[in-house]
Image (cartoon, coloured by chain):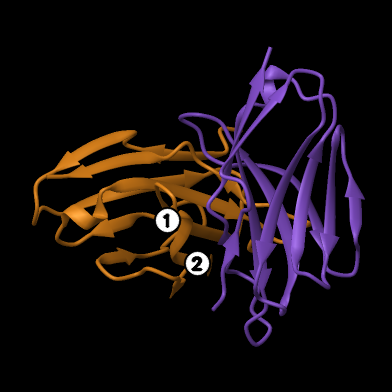
Chain colours: A purple, B orange
Amino acid sequence: GESVGLHLPTLSVQEGDNSIINCAYSNSASDYFIWYKQESGKGPQFIIDIRSNMDKRQGQRVTVLLNKTVKHLSLQIAATQPGDSAVYFCAENPIYGGATNKLIFGTGTLLAVQP
Amino acid sequence: NAGVTQTPKFQVLKTGQSMTLQCAQDMNHEYMSWYRQDPGMGLRLIHYSVGAGITDQGEVPNGYNVSRSTTEDFPLRLLSAAPSQTSVYFCASGRSGGRGDSPLHFGNGTRLTVT
């Protein structure tokens, strides 16, 4: 079926280390992927996105990697800071007959940054 | 700009009661949507709208109604609340349904408990 899932529900890292959050998707028709960050008591916040014609995209301290062969997405956070502690969601946008309005979210990974 | 504003922040209902969750955005976004977030299940799309007067069902529409009479507002109505509708509800808006040129902007959610 169509689903987006995460390998690790909880990730604990030391401040200053790099973090890698992984995500598997099952819909090969998906052509657009997004990472969101959700802090406690708030709504998801857009971090970075990538289209299926790319395999890597970099932002400020974040990098998203896409491996279409194994349907795998990852978010790398460099020099992780306490403010990065949150739940991270990947989301995919599958194409249904051309419509692109239905984001499918993964279940989320909790990133805990230890000082 | 206030972004996406949801009211109320918290609500407790008895089984069978009805209510409306309000959502307003001031970014002139054409696309608006409602998601529910349950533990371990990520965010699931309830209903969405690509413009005033146009609505469509998402993944879990049963028990909910929506309407879009203006660009700014997208209320979600619970017709007869059930305990299974206990959840956190998020409203989101975007220029084009969540694609890269316009990521979804989320409100801070409404936490609903049905007893």
Amino acid on which disc 1 is placed:
Phe
Residue B31, compared with residue B104, is above or below; it is below
Which label is found at residue B61? none
Q: Earlier in the sequence, mark 1 or mark 2?
A: 2
| Location of mark 1 (residue) | B74
- Horizontal side of B57 relative to A95 (left or right) equals left
Quadrant the C terminus of chain A occupies: top right
- Horizontal side of B33 relative to A84 (left or right) equals left
| Location of mark 2 (residue) | B49
Residue A102 x %, y %: 57, 68
Residue A26, compared with residue A76, is above or below; it is below
Residue A81 vs residue B36, the one in the foreground: A81
Query: Element at badge 1?
Result: loop
Local crowd at mark 1 within 10 Å, few (<14), some, or many (≥20)? Answer: many
Residue B47 x %, y %: 43, 66
Residue A114, compared with residue A35, is above or below; it is above
